[in-house]
Image: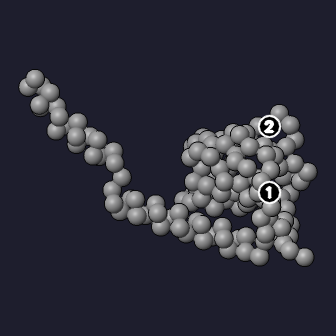
Amino acid sequence: MRILLLLAPLAAGILAACAPTVAETRSAEERQARDRAKVSRALAGLTPGQAQNCLSGIDRRTARVQTIGGTLLFRVNRNRVFRNDMNGSCATSAIDPIFVTQTPTTALCRGDIAQLIDRASRFPIGACSYGDFVPYTRAK
């Protein structure tokens, strides 16, 4: 019983150390707000269409890809952009990773896994999966 009484403060301290601080929480919320604003600016003037399971019919090698937090924007041309909100730990505000995806087809689909590679060290730093692909087009 004494051991439990002695270990209780230690366990409480360990758990408290794992919790984010108020400053960390505030910083994360501010970063997310900045990312949402950047995505809104990047998609300004474009109208969202119906979400698609797969991104096919475009040349992914020539499409410009912009990473904003956990959102990828595949810019096909100035009138067409596909938005993908990644699932998992792909919030990349502080870094610019390389996304490596292996797909069995030529399409990139919801649920496909992207491995994130650090550009400098070339080490894997995380993985996440693609969500729905939402097309945004400029009204004519």
- Residue plotted at (54% across, 59% down): 94
Q: Where 113 sits versus 63, above or below?
A: above
Question: What is the three-letter code of the residue carrying label 1?
Answer: Gln
Q: Where 73 sits versus 79, above or below?
A: above
Q: Where 126 sits versus 63, above or below?
A: above
Query: In the image, is 70 to the left or to the right of 59?
Result: left
Residue 119 in the image: x percent, y percent? Answer: 63, 51
Mark 1 or mark 2: which comes first in sequence? 1
- The answer to whether residue 123 shows anywhere in this view is no
Which residue has dot 2 on it?
Answer: 103
Query: In the image, is 12 to the left or to the right of 88?
Result: left
- Residue plotted at (51% across, 64% down): 31
| Crowd around label 2: few <14 · some 14–19 · many ≥20 (10 Å) | few
Q: Which mark is residue 13?
A: none
Question: What is the three-letter code of the residue carrying label 2?
Answer: Thr
Which residue has dot 1 on it?
Answer: 50
Q: Secondary structure at mark 2?
A: loop
Q: Quadrant of residue 80?
A: bottom right
Which residue is at the front of the view, 122 or 34? Answer: 34
Query: In the image, is 33 to the left or to the right of 66?
Result: left
Q: Secondary structure at mark 1?
A: loop
Of the 4 image quadrants, the one containing the C terminus is: bottom right
Disc 1 vs disc 2: which is toward the camera? Answer: 1
